[in-house]
């Protein structure tokens, strides 16, 4: 249906939508760190990070590649399992305040113990303990996806995949790839994705955030992913869009991130509505919320206003997210109950 033919929503309806229980599938763990959290940690550890902050305290970067280096600089002060446990508490408090009841987060062994499996287990243990405490306190469920970093190259990705395979279970349930999409090709990482698949992990990869439809196809064909991080540039080729719809590949769409980084000039030019109308399974996430000045509530409000999506549409979106979630069936059913009974 054309947007003009849909009923516009008033402020009260939009406010009710922002309060719906939400499932988020695409959240970079370190990317959820509030700038104040990183600044305090840098001060405590006597690391000079002044260059990565604006005068108002927000993160400062010029473009996507610079964003990745600022992200890594911020991450450099997260040095112990306790730092990551505290980060987990801070991130989940924010998510819960935004009505998120289920979240999947990208964790990188590269940042948690430098790829050493013994160290990685310690980081993971600390993060899981903090996540369990947050679940008891706020009713939010977290699951982890080990993520290799594309611009660190295929060899380092294998180390990440080994960590993932060693710790795969109901909690650590996925493997994926983030980082600079303009470096190398999806298939350079097929060994790592094969290792993760054999360990029982579900797969996702960032594709079609910066490169076009071909990149999205390669993620599906060369890595065999069930989900794609972003995938929005598939819109440049309708045959690719139809392939996504037919194969029921779920897109982890992060509209606010895409607009903030300039992938699309504004939300009304963003293809999420077109993709959905053409039958692609789309979901909504924040990516790195403080970096992009967004939250799940802001994402929902902006989508409701721009595309006139009503509460039922958002509930369908959350049901789609849960059917594509990497958790076990029992967790899925428990979260679906919350989504269906707001
Ligand atoms: N790492 C953190 N955020 C990312 C993004 N939007 N794209 C690729 N890698 C990332
Ligand atoms: Zn991302």
Image: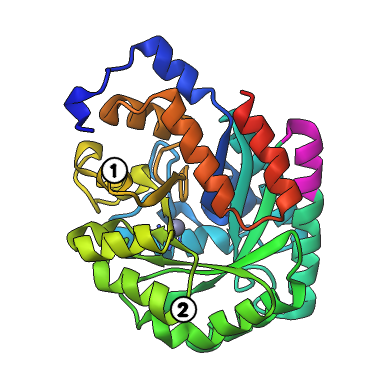
Give the image's coloring scheme: rainbow
Left or right of 223 in this view: 103: right
Q: Is residue 219 above or below residue 19?
A: below
Quadrant in the rendering for residue 260: top left
Q: Secondary structure at mark 2?
A: helix
Left or right of 167 in this view: 157: left
Structural crowding at the residue carrying mark 2, measured as other residues with C-alpha within 10 Å and reported as few (<14), some (14–19) or many (≥20): many
Query: 291 or 149: nearer the eye?
Result: 149
Query: 328 or 48: nearer the eye?
Result: 328
Q: Position of residue 156 (x, y in %)?
A: 55, 84
Residue denoted by label 2: 223
Residue denoted by label 1: 277
Q: Secondary structure at mark 1?
A: helix
Give whichever of discs 1 and 2 has the lower sequence position: 2
Q: Position of residue 24 (x, y in %)?
A: 54, 45
Residues in magenta? 130-139
Dominant SS in magenta: helix
Q: Are marks 1 and 2 in contact (CB under 8 Å)?
A: no
Q: Is residue 270 above or below residue 187?
A: above
Q: Is residue 34 visible?
A: no
Structural crowding at the residue carrying mark 1, measured as other residues with C-alpha within 10 Å and reported as few (<14), some (14–19) or many (≥20): few
Q: Position of residue 233 (x, y in %)?
A: 26, 59
């Amino acid at each position: 249906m054309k947007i003009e033919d849909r009923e516009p929503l008033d402020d009260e309806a939009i406010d009710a939508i922002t309060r719906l229980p939400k499932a988020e599938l695409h959240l970079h763990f370190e990317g959820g760190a509030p700038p104040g959290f990183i600044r305090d940690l840098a001060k405590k550890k006597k690391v000079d990070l002044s260059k990565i902050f604006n005068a108002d305290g927000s993160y400062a970067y010029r473009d996507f590649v610079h964003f990745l280096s600022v992200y890594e600089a911020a991450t450099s002060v997260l040095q112990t399992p306790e730092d990551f446990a505290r980060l987990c508490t801070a991130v989940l408090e924010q998510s819960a305040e935004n009505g998120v009841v289920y979240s999947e987060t990208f964790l990188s062994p590269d940042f948690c113990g430098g790829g050493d499996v013994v160290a990685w287990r310690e980081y993971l243990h600390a993060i899981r303990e903090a996540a369990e405490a947050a679940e008891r306190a706020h009713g939010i469920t977290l699951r982890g996806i080990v993520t290799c970093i594309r611009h660190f190259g295929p060899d380092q990705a294998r180390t990440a995949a080994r960590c993932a395979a060693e710790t795969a279970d109901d909690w650590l349930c996925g493997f994926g790839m983030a980082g600079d999409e303009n470096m190398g090709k999806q298939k350079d990482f097929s060994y790592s994705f094969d290792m993760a698949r054999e360990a029982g992990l579900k797969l996702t990869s960032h594709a079609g955030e910066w490169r076009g439809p071909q990149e999205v196809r390669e993620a599906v064909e060369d890595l065999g992913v069930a989900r794609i991080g972003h995938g929005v540039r598939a819109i440049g080729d309708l045959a690719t869009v139809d392939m996504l719809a037919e194969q029921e590949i779920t897109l982890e769409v992060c509209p606010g991130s895409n607009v903030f980084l300039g992938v699309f000039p504004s939300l009304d030019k963003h293809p999420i509505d077109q993709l959905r109308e053409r039958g692609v399974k789309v979901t909504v996430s924040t990516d790195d919320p403080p970096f992009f000045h967004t939250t799940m509530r802001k994402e929902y409000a902006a989508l409701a206003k721009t595309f006139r999506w009503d509460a039922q549409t958002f509930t369908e979106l959350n049901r789609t997210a849960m059917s594509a979630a990497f958790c076990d069936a029992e967790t899925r059913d428990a979260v679906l109950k919350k989504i269906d009974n707001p």
